[in-house]
Image (spheres, rainbow, N blue to C red):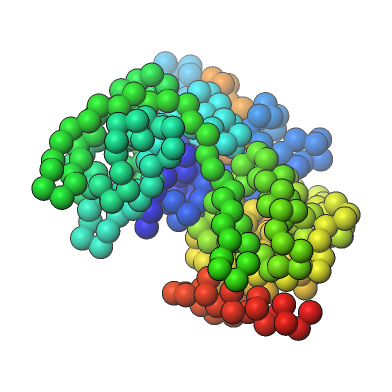
Amino acid sequence: MSGREPLCSPRRFGRGAALTLVFASVLVAGAATGSLPDNRGRSASGAARAAAPTSPPEAVTRAAEEAMADGKSPLEAAERAVSRSGDRWAAVYSEGEYEQFAQSLDGLYTGVGLEARRERDGRIEVTKVQAGSPAAAAGIRAGDRLRSVDGSTVDGRPVTDVVSLLRGDATDAAAGTTVRLGLERGTRVWTQTLRRARLSTDSVTVSTLAGGVTVIRITAFTKGAGDAVRTAVDAAPAGAGVVLDLRGNSGGLVTEAVSTASVFLDGGLVATYDVEGEQRALHADSGGDTTRPLVALVDGGTMSAAELLTGALRDRGRAVVVGSRTFGKGSVQMPSRLPDGSVAELTVGHYSTPSGRSVDGTGVTPDLDADDGALERAETLLSGLGDAS
């Protein structure tokens, strides 16, 4: 399992799990889940910029109000009420935390610029250092071992916890606050104090394989992801195949997933969804590239908006899906403002692929199973598709 600061664990009730603010390959499963436009043009679950317009369930509101009247924490009372609701994907945020979540969907986060993973022996290894970040300026490299954060040993801890410590989620750490890292490189062991900064995520990265295939990796559907994919496809050699790598993509803004679908579809249905029983539909824009060979890579960390996109491309006959069964997160959440300004996000509905299949609890089954070597399988498949065309 790997981790990256702007990302987060599956969103369930409670602040700790919900607020490691993730998206992507990093922490395996999903933060910004199922953000779909509601019937007033706002967005569910991902569009945190909307002002949490809906009314929360009576039990949650009552718990928060009673806590305020007793001089207790409305936020903690709401968390308890949400946890008792049985809503697996519900989350409760303080007002500041929700604003932080909104910023992360804009592709921004506060941190030091490290990605890391936990090795089989429990050690935490740095896998990437973001260019221009505090970590890069301090000379930290991929392959360094992260031993501690602010004096807390990280060996054996979930990557989500390590990410939370780096970001300072428990203390609402802002840009400019410091964090002390214990590091190891070979025989060298040292302590480095870094100052957190506002950084941008690289949710879309592009590379080219030796055979000319363009690989577009999307780790999260943050703002602008769809435009970045379109730019990459427009720059690819004419007729060359594209691999859309959605492995570990835990979701994000569904508007960006639909925008990405529009790159490869000429209009038509992307998904249907319901909000409190009312059926709605999402459609691609016209004018997409419908002839370029396309393979989508998925795995068990592909979820929510990424599953919506995968289901659309497969059902519409536009992509061959390679990998392993996706996570199965097909529910829709809506934000609700509580009396003290905090926000509860609760499940209100589910979405289906163009053929009418729900992915919730079942996921998307790939056309070709592949675990190790999935990218190589995709490259081989694209070479065959290119010959056929």
**Who is closer to the viewer here, 320 or 326?**
320
**Who is closer to the viewer here, 223 or 22?**
223
Q: Residue at x 61, y 57 (%)?
A: 216
**Residue 77 in sight in this render:** no
Q: Residue at x 48, y 54 (%)?
A: 25
Quadrant in the picture for the N terminus: bottom left
Name the side, left or right, on which 228 lies relative to 87. Answer: right
Residue 51 lies, in percent from the top left, at 67, 26
Where is 175 relative to 317, above or below?
Answer: above
Name the side, left or right, on which 77 lies relative to 207. Answer: left
Q: In which quadrant of the rendered view does residue 287 lie? A: bottom right
Q: Looking at this rendering, what residue extends furthest in the left direction?
A: 187
Residue 333 lies, in percent from the top left, at 63, 45
Q: Residue at x 69, y 29 (%)?
A: 50
**Residue 6 in sight in this render:** yes
Q: Residue at x 64, y 53 (%)?
A: 305
Where is 308 relative to 386, above or below?
Answer: above
Residue 316 lies, in percent from the top left, at 79, 69
Where is 39 relative to 296, above or below?
Answer: above
Name the side, left or right, on which 262 lies relative to 334. Answer: right
Residue 94 lies, in percent from the top left, at 49, 26
